[in-house]
Image (cartoon, rainbow, N blue to C red):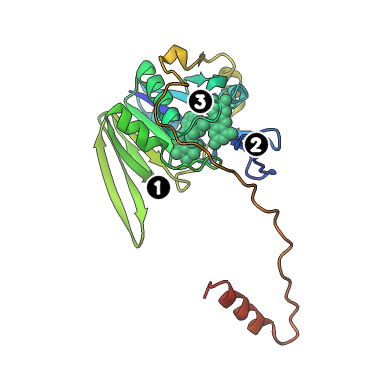
Amino acid sequence: MKIAVLVKEVPDSYGERKLDTTTGLADRGASDRVIDEITARAVEAAVSYADSAQDAEVVLVTMGPESAESMLRKTLAMGADSACHISDEALTGADLGLSAEVLAAALRRIGFDLVIAGDVSSDGTGGLLPTMLAQRLGVAHLTSLDSAQISETEVSGERGTYGGTVSLRADLPAVVSVTERMPDPRFPGFKGIMSAKKKPLETLTAADLGVDAQADVPRSIMLSVTQAPARTAGTKVTDEGEAGTQLADYLAEKRLV
Ligand SMILES: Cc1cc2nc3c(=O)[nH]c(=O)nc-3n(C[C@H](O)[C@H](O)[C@H](O)COP(=O)(O)OP(=O)(O)OC[C@H]3O[C@@H](n4cnc5c(N)ncnc54)[C@H](O)[C@@H]3O)c2cc1C
């Protein structure tokens, strides 16, 4: 059983988050670079299955800048067996379509029974990559699972919906995307950190995967990009007998009540 987990390096959400308004890309120098938290939960789902299964293999896959290699090494310490890094400057600013094409080619090369991804990344927030990937790979896709059960032949899980829960199941091979409601990722122990240094990590380019990043196919084009305004201090209400009314007025003005 081979489980591929799609992990992504993102700017730390607790640090300053800035956009390079010339390129539209995340300004990766503005804060620490960390694994996207939901993708860490996806790794946890895979390694906790592997902990109790015989012959389970977990492969981390990422497409990202050179710096993503260090994120992969740290994540290998959680218990994954190997990693694949697609690192190619020609893929800088790749849209969802090109990213899905590259990752699908990598997954075909690696081989997989199950692919686990996050439902949405904290920087790009496209929220569509796993679906596009499943379409390209021609396998089922269980979307936005809050819990997942994996067996040798199938994967199932629950998706929270407005006012209820939907249970889903698919035969393997399949792609699943998981949400932030999945169990917390484990902290790697000393043994895991030491063994991660020697685990196989393959680096590939788009050309290695037979993908032409400049090919003349429809791609989405970023027209403009605007940095979010800096946060303001907010309004402070001092209670002199009118605080309740002021709060109610504030909520009504913001259309929150
Ligand atoms: C050199 C280089 C620089 C890049 N710089 C940026 C950047 O500044 N900002 C940015 O958002 N993207 C960057 N990328 C990555 C790529 O352009 C986006 O990841 C891609 O368009 C997916 O968009 P998304 O994150 O909105 O997808 P979503 O659909 O929101 O992602 C959902 C899930 O898909 C998986 N996934 C998404 N992207 C990747 C990936 N790259 N590798 C592995 N799994 C993935 C994750 O499991 C994620 O949780 C860069 C890539 C390269 C090679």
Residue 126 is situated, as x and y percent measured from the top left of the image, at 47, 42
Q: Nearer the viewer, residue 116 or 203?
A: 203
Number of other residues with Cα within 10 Å of mark 3, as a class: few under 14, some 14 to 19, many 20 or more:
many
Provide the secondary structure element on which disc 1 rests. Answer: loop
Decide which of tag 2 and tag 1 comes sooner along the chain.
2
Q: Nearer the viewer, residue 148 or 135?
A: 135
Disc 3 CB within 8 Å of nearest ligand 1 atom: yes
Q: Which mark is residue 28?
A: none
Q: Nearer the viewer, residue 19 or 203?
A: 19
Q: Which mark is residue 63?
A: 3
The amino acid on which the numbered mark 1 sits, given as a three-letter code, is Asp
- What is the distance, in whole Å, between disc 3 and disc 2 at their CAs? 22 Å
Decide which of tag 3 and tag 2 comes sooner along the chain.
2
**Residue drawn 39% across the image and 36% down it:** 130
Provide the secondary structure element on which disc 2 rests. Answer: loop
Q: Where is 156 relative to 2, above or below?
A: below
In this view, the residue farthest toward the bottom is 241
Number of other residues with Cα within 10 Å of mark 2, as a class: few under 14, some 14 to 19, many 20 or more:
few
Q: Which of labels 2 and 1 is toward the front?
A: 2
Q: Is residue 168 left or right of residue 254?
A: left
The amino acid on which the numbered mark 3 sits, given as a three-letter code, is Met
**From where the camera sits, is residue 44 visible?**
no
Residue 99 is situated, as x and y percent measured from the top left of the image, at 45, 29
Q: Which mark is residue 22?
A: 2
Decide which of tag 1 and tag 3 comes sooner along the chain.
3
**Residue drawn 53% across the image and 73% down it:** 255
Question: Which residue position is annotated with label 1?
Answer: 146
Residue 184 is situated, as x and y percent measured from the top left of the image, at 51, 42
- What is the distance, in whole Å, between disc 2 and disc 1 at their CAs? 37 Å
**From where the camera sits, is residue 227 visible?**
yes
- Do the numbered discs 1 and 3 sit on residues whose CB atoms are within 8 Å? no
- Do the numbered discs 2 and 1 sit on residues whose CB atoms are within 8 Å? no
